[in-house]
Image: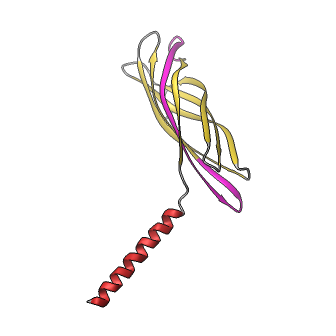
Amino acid sequence: MFHSSKLVAALGTLVLLAAAASAQNQPTTYIYDAYVDNQTTVNTCSAGENVNLNGTIRFSYQVTTDSTGNHFVIKAASNLTGVGQTTGVNYTAVESNEYDSDTMDSSKDMTVELKSDLTPQGATPSMTLVQDLHITADTNGSITAEVVSNDTSCGGAN
């Protein structure tokens, strides 16, 4: 009985050590929230109505380094609402996308597109919201990001 207790204790210790080693090998995830406050896009599907957008875009990223350089994996996740300034129609846009980049530099500067369905409440047709995002991230955990433009096209993105 004593021998089997020692065996169970030894196996339990090995499992805990393996889990701790695995957790130490996981890259840190850095997070930055960019606030979208009354940014305007134009509903190009109906008479050019301005739509004011509000909400957040959460940027999260990890960076790993090996002999070939630094590998950045950046995810942008939007959670936006919008209001048509003429019709009062309410819109929502919830989407995420991942952007990967490899570089020998300690930082990465990129401009990417995030496309999402700008879905109205009611009978108004859906649009695709295309946001240009400018992102700068480095290997020390610093990230800055902003929406540099908002455009729309008729129909959904997906």
- What residue is shown at x 46% (from left), y 15% (from top)? 84
Q: Residue placed farthest to the right in the image?
A: 104
Seen at 61% across and 37% down, the residue is 144
Front in this rendered view, residue 77 or 26: 26
**Quadrant location of the N terminus in the rendered image:** bottom left
Instruction: Relative to 6, say whether 19 is above or below.
Output: above
Question: Would residue 142 be counted in the magenta stretch?
Answer: no
Give the answer, above or below, for where 154 lies relative to 4.
above
- Residue range corresponding to the magenta coloring: 44-73
For the point 47% across and 12% down, the residue is 85
Seen in the picture, residue 108 relative to 121 is either above or below; the reply is below
Task: Report the side of 5 relative to 102 (left or right).
Answer: left
Q: Position of residue 125 (x, y in %)?
A: 44, 21
Report the predominant secondary structure element of the magenta stretch. Answer: strand
Q: Which of the colour schemes (rainbow, by chain, secondary structure, one colour) is used?
A: secondary structure
Residue 12 drawn at (x, y percent): 37, 76
Q: How many marks?
A: 0
Which quadrant of the view contains residue 114? top right
Measured as percent of width and height from the top left, residue 54 is found at 48, 24
Residue 9 placement (x, y as % from top left): 35, 80
| Residue in view at x 37 percent, y 22 percent | 121
Looking at this view, is 105 or 1 the one in front? 1
Is 47 included in the stretch rendered in magenta? yes
Q: Residue furthest left?
A: 1
Q: Is residue 147 left or right of residue 19?
A: right
